[in-house]
Each structure stands twice: as structure tokens, then as C-alpha cells.
Image (cartoon, rainbow, N blue to C red):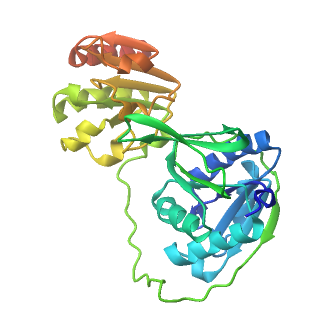
Amino acid sequence: MDLNDYKGVFIFAQQVDNKIDNIAYELIGKGKELAAALGTDVTAVLAGYNVKGLADSLAEYGADRVIVVDDPALEVYMTEPYTHAIASVIKKFKPEIMLVGATAIGRDLGPRVSARVATGLTADCTFLEIGTFHEKENQLLMTRPAFGGNTIATIACPDNRPQMATVRPGVMQKLDPTPGAKAEVVEYNPGFTPDHKYVEILKVVKEVAATADIMDAKILVSGGRGMGSPENFGMLEELAEALGGMVSCSRAVVDAGWKPKAMQVGQTGKTVRPKLYIACGISGAIQHLAGMEESDVIIAINKDETAPIFDVADYGIVGDVKKIVPKLTEAIKNSKA
């Protein structure tokens, strides 16, 4: 393998039902940063059926080029045809870096593609940068939590290409769109022949979300085990309503059965970047911090003044959360009166 043959930063532009997922825009944003350090450009790989019209959206968020793999075999996500599509793109166009979102689809697709093209894959990354590894310059340094979130590992893939990573949704920041921006569009189809690896989809059942996604919230009021009971989350809901935000929670709350996993923030939950994050009765285990420490402003309320949450908080209140939150809610309501 001649590493000099591999150029450019590629991202997998995940789409479902002909709608680009937000993770694609986040990957383009990070890809532009990495590409600038390498003096190269960003290519979005768009796979699906009748999806060419989505290329302009990717261009508006910063893609310099869009490779479109359009085929009826790709209308609904299936492991084998999508693996064939992305692996074929890599073999033909030879990217130096390939980024995939760590979504349900990406976690299925990424490892299979990396095996197909004989390279490494660092999964569930929370930080990416270009740097030096063992005196080799311009390497992709991929950082991810390890050992249950108790340590952070930085991994490189110096001897194989592309350097591949799956990236947690919500960790990277998308760029502001440039309306009307255009990218070079390249249509490529490697050909699809169903074989014994294909599956047959009998029915697609779509789940209707009962609540909005906490990853989209600008303000989050998050509760932990220190709330004492599921009933006490009512006061957090009142505070969130007064602020125009949403309620989220820690893993301990989900494990106790108080709240659904869709509300969980942390390494095994969702990564959030709200403008305001209020942590109520949350001690601040490293697994939880990994999911919210990039919030613009963090307010912590906890009766234990040594709780790790105070190490990342911009403002801290030491005291009984069940007494403080109602007073805080009342003060906010009065300020609006």
C-alpha cells in the first residue's frame, strides 16, 4: 500500500427516507477542519436511491465534492449493499480519512467497510485532530473513551489507509450553511448483484417519537439519583418549562426505571451541547461528563461540595436540590411576570 496514493477527507453522508441526518453535517464541519490542516478538501459520500437532489444540501454545509451512489438496492439500509457501495468508493477514490457517524447505521456499516478495505477503525470517537504519531506527521489522532469511560485513549492508524473512525452524534459542530453553495457532483455505481449475504426486508415499522430529542434542546434541566424519586422530576419539568427547555437525566435514573433511555445523557446515552445545562443531583461521573461537558454554560446543584460535577460547572450551588429548584423556578417565573 502506497500511502501517498490516498488523499482527501471523506465522510459518509447518512440519509434515511431521502432526508440527510444531522450527523452528516457535523462530520462535514469536522472534516473541513481536518482537511484544512492537511491542505486538502472534503468529499461527502451519499448512498441511496433517487438521492442526487440531496447533494446541494451537503454543499451548503461545506462539502467540496459529493460522490453519489444511486441504486434501487440502496433504497432502504441493508448491511451488504451499503458495505459494497462505500467499500467500492474507497477502493476507487482512495481517501486518506473516512469518517462515519456512530449511529445505529454507522455502527453496523463502519466495521464492515474497514474490514472490506483492510484498514483499522476507531469506534465512538469524541475528538479528532491532525498531529504527529511516533514521529510520523499528519496523522489522524482519534480519541475515544475506554475501559468503561474511566480513561481516554488516543489511537492512530499510521500504516494503513484510509484512517477510519466512527464519531458520536452531537460531539462535532456543523458549520453555518451557505445558501446556494455548490459542490462537484460525481455519480458512481459499482454495480449490485444480490447474493447470499443479502437479506429481505419484509416490513419497516417506524416508531413515532413521543417527545422531542434532547440533542436538539438549547436548554436542558438534567436530574440524577440525587433527585430521590421519580416523582421529584416534576419540579425539574416545571423548571424546564419556565426556561423553555427540556428534561434529561443520568444513567442511574434510567437504570432505576425512573425515565426512558431516550432522555439519558452520557457515554452510553446521548451527547448534548445545549447553551445551558443545569445538573440537578448529579454527582458527575466521567461517563456522564463525556456527554455534556461541551455545553456552553453548566450550572450544578448538589449537596456534596466535593462532587466531580463542580469541576466542569461554570456556576455551582451547594445545597438540597429539592429545596433549591422550586425557589429557582419561582424566581424565573416572577422575573417574567
Using residue 170 as the reference point, say whether residue 211 is left or right of it: left
Where is residue 118? Give x, y as percent.
Answer: 60, 66
Q: Is residue 169 above or below residue 127?
A: below
Q: Is residue 104 above or below residue 217?
A: below
**The N terminus is located in which quarter?**
bottom right
Q: Residue at x 74, y 42 (%)?
A: 138
From the image, which quarter does the C terminus lie in? top left
The residue positioned farthest toward the front in the image shown: 134
Classify residue 6 by image quadrant: bottom right
4 displayed left or right of 296: right
Instruction: Please count the marks in the image.
Output: 0
Q: Residue at x 71, y 70 (%)?
A: 91
Q: Quadrant of residue 92?
A: bottom right
Q: Tell me if residue 130 can be seen.
A: no
Residue 89, how many percent across, how many down?
A: 70, 70
Q: Residue at x 21, y 19 (%)?
A: 322
Identify the residue at image location x=22%, y=25%: 226
Task: Give coordinates of residue 66: x percent, y percent.
Answer: 75, 62
Seen from the viewer's position, the closer of residues 47 and 163 is 163
> How far from the left and from the top, in percent, is residue 280?
30, 24
Using the rendered view, name the quadrant where residue 325 is placed.
top left
Return the residue nearer the eye: 270 or 79: 79
Left or right of 147? Residue 179 is right
Q: Nearer the viewer, residue 232 or 191?
A: 191
Q: Is residue 299 visible?
A: yes
